Image: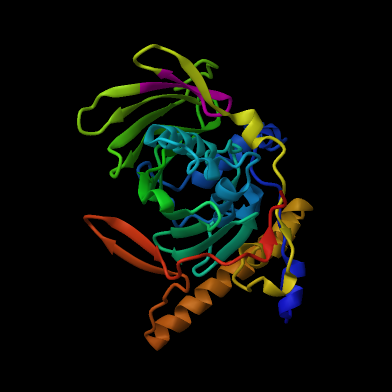
Amino acid sequence: MLTEGELGTNAVLTAPLSLEGEDSEANNGSPNLLQRIFSLLSSVQPGSDLIRLQLPPLFNLPKSQLQCYGESVYCINTDLLSNCNHGESPLDRIISVIAWNISTLRPLTFGLAPYNPVLGETHHVSRGTLNVLLEQVSHHPPVTALHATDEKANIELIWCHSPIPKFCGTHIETEVHGVRQLNLLDKNETYAMNSPKLVIRFLPVPGVEWLGNTTIRCKETGLEAELCYRGSSYFPRRSIHRSIKGKIFRSLSSQTIYEINGHWDRAVTIKKFSNESVTTIYNANEVLSGLKTPIVEDPKGVLPSESAVIWAEVSQAILQKCWEKAREAKTVVEEKQREVAEERKLKDENWVPKHFTVSHSKENGWECLPNVKLVPPAPIVVTL
C-alpha cells in the first residue's frame, strides 16, 4: 500500500487540452475508428442515455472528466479571470466575463473521451493565487462540483455540472445541466451562465462541436449576453465552423449595446451598436496555445481521492499504448467503486460529499454549495 508521499509521486498528469490537441494522430476520423465506435454503440438504441456506458481504454483520454473541467479554469496563458474584476464599468466587466467564458471551451478529439469520475473523486490545483477544487458529488447521475477562489483578485467560481449524453443515431448529444456562477466579490456582482451542448458527429463527417445557446446574466447590473455557438451541419465550412454570434443588452429594456461575432478557436469581436466600432475581445491562439502541464509540488499533500492518483495506472498504460494493461487497471478502479457502493448499501449508509453541500429539486435542478469560504492552496500547481 502506498504512503501519502508515494501517492503524490505516483500521480500521472498529462498535457491539458489546447488548440494543438486537435492535431493529434488520434483525431483522424479513420474508417477503422468509426467501425470500432459503431461496434461499441451497436446495442444502444437512438434516444438512449449513455451515462452508464463504460468505454474501453482505447477510447479514453489519459485523464478524468474532473481534470478536463479544472483545466478549463486553471490552464490558460492569459489571466482572463482576474481581468473580469478590473473593468471600471459594468459593461467593461461583462465584456471581460464573456471573453473568459469563451476561453473555457477547448477543442476535443473525435473518438476519445475522459474517464467517468468515481464518486468522491477530487481534483485540486493552484495557479498563482487561484485555487481550484473539484469533487464528484454524484455518480448516477454524474454531477461534478467546482469551487475556485482567488483572494487577491476577489473572485469566486461555483460550478455544478451534470452532463446527460444521448445517442441520436448519427451523433451523440450531451446537454450539460447546472449553473456556473462567477462572483466578483468586491463589486457585489454575480454572473450566472450555462454551458453549450457537446455534439459528437459520426456521419457524414466525424467531428466534435460545441453547439447551442448560452446566456450570461448579471442581475445586479441588469446586463445580459446571449451567445449562439454554431457548427457545420454536414460538411465543414470554415466560416461557420466553431463560430459565435450574439449580443450584449440590457435585461429590462432589451436594448442591444454590442453585437458579438467570431470563432471561439480563433478570434471574437464586439461591435458597438451605436457607432459600429469593432474591438477584439478574445484571441484563442494567445490564450490556449502552448499550455503548461500541472506538476506535483507537494507529494505529501496529494489526497488518495485525487484524479491523477486514482487513474494513474490507467493513464500510464494508455500513454504507453499498453491496452490490455490499461483495461485491467481500469477494471480494478471500476470494481473497487462497485464494492464500496455495495458496502454502503449493506450498511444502509448514504454517501456525503466532503467539500460541498448538494441539493436537487425539479424546479432548480442540482445545486452544489462549497463548505468553506476559500479554497486552500493545492499540492498540484500550474507554474506561471
Residue 191, position as x, y percentages in the image: 37, 45
- Overall secondary structure of the magenta stretch? strand
- Toward the top, the furthest residue is 275
Of residue 254 and residue 122, the one placed in the foreground of this image is 254
Q: Is residue 329 magenta?
A: no
**Is residue 142 shown above or below 16?**
below
| Residue 98 horizontal side relative to residue 286, left or right | left
Among all residues in the image, which is located at the extreme front?
88
Q: Is residue 178 above or below residue 306?
A: above
Percent x, y of residue 151: 53, 58
Magenta-colored stretch includes residue 263: yes
Picture layout, residue 234 above or below residue 163: above
Query: What segment carries the magenta color?
Result: 258-271
Q: Image quadrant of residue 224?
A: top left
Using the rendered view, name the quadrant where residue 227 is placed: top left
**Viewer-nearest residue: 241 or 325:** 241
Residue 223 in sight in this render? yes
Residue 346 location, quadrant: bottom left
Residue 125 coordinates in the image, percent (x, y) = 62, 59
Where is residue 89 drawn, in percent x and y?
Answer: 40, 35
Q: How is the image coloured?
A: rainbow
Residue projecting furthest to the right: 320
Would residue 162 be seen by someone viewing this image from the given angle? no
The residue depicted at 46 percent of the width and 55 percent of the height is 156
